Image (cartoon, rainbow, N blue to C red):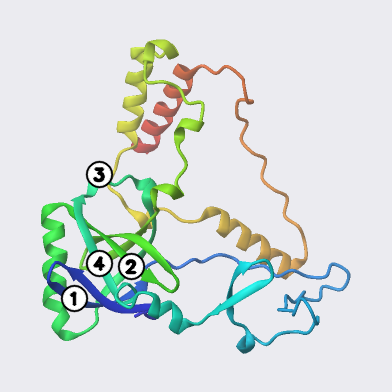
Amino acid sequence: MSRSIWKGDISFGLVTIPVSIHPAEERNELTFHLLDGRDMAPIRQQRVNSVTGEIVPWEETVKGYEYEPDRFVVITDDDFRAADVEATRTVDVLAMVRAEEISTLFYDRPYFLAPASKAARKPYAILRDTLARTGYVGVASVVIRTRQHLAAILPVGDALVLDMLRFPSDLRSADELELPGSDPAELGVTDAEMDLASQLVEAMTGPWDPSAYHDTYREALTALIEHKVETGEVLAPPIPEERPAAGEVVDIMSLLKRSLDERRAAGGA
């Protein structure tokens, strides 16, 4: 099991369920180091005292809030906890809403919730199965580290997932964009074009299989790195497929027909 980043209780009405929070995502990103291009020596980033110029050891650093220019008040971990003891140890369920009512724009980062004791297993299962049966998700508030989060509690298989939600103030409005309206006639969209697009969608439908998708860019970059390690040669980038230039008027019908024919051919093969 991954390391727990938080322990506390789900507060659901009068019911409390001891749980621990575990990261549900694993970022397999390639990491790169900044080097001095003259001799390939790694460049170090250090914490330096802005007055003395001395390097500050990590254990000597503290968190400070600047309440006036160049005047700080130090806040300790105990201070963060003392600000609201209840908030720092509770996933407080505020409401139950239909899952489909929450736009995907609000979902930010998933975490697994695990029962933190043997006694917590039964109420954990009851909450999980009730949410699965009713189609509701719990909207909750939780404080992790130094920040309060809005979150959704939802069932995924045998697990309860705590998915951090963005606050409305964190999202921009699409009203700022110049988007096409919903009147097909105004856009010059024909019934034939819509029918072909629908056929293409139908031809591409299938069950959700996450194992069918992978990070092709990361794989290509890894292969390039391995090649450079072995030979020192630089691989020539592939020639990109020709696409219509920006602003060029394209024949939607022909593109849809071509896409549909290719999809059907691939399906037949």
Tags 3 and 2 touching, CB below 8 Å: no
Q: Amino acid under label 2?
A: Val
| Mark 3 and mark 1 residues within 8 Å of each other at the beta carbon | no
> How would you rate the neighbour count of disc 4 (Cα within 10 Å): few for under 14, some for 14-19, many for 20 or more?
many
Q: Could you classify mark 3 by the number of other residues whose Cα lies within 10 Å: few (under 14), some (14-19), or many (20 or more)?
A: few
Alpha-carbon span between mark 4 and mark 1: 11 Å
Q: In the rendered image, which residue does mark 4 sit on? A: 92
Question: Do the residues bearing badges 2 and 4 touch, measured as CB atoms within 8 Å?
Answer: yes
Q: Which mark is residue 142?
A: 2
Q: Report crowding for label 1: few under 14, some 14 to 19, many 20 or more residues within 10 A (C-alpha).
A: many
Of callouts 2 and 1, the N-terminal one = 1
Image location (x, y in percent) of residue 203: 32, 33
Amino acid type of the residue that numbered disc 3 sits on in the rendered structure: Glu
- Of labels 3 and 4, earlier in sequence is 4
Q: Nearer the viewer, mark 3 or mark 2?
A: 2
Residue 185 on image: x %, y %: 38, 10
Would residue 139 appear left or right of 232 to someone viewing this image?
A: left
| Rendered image: mark on residue 17 | 1
> Would you name the residue on which mark 3 appears?
101
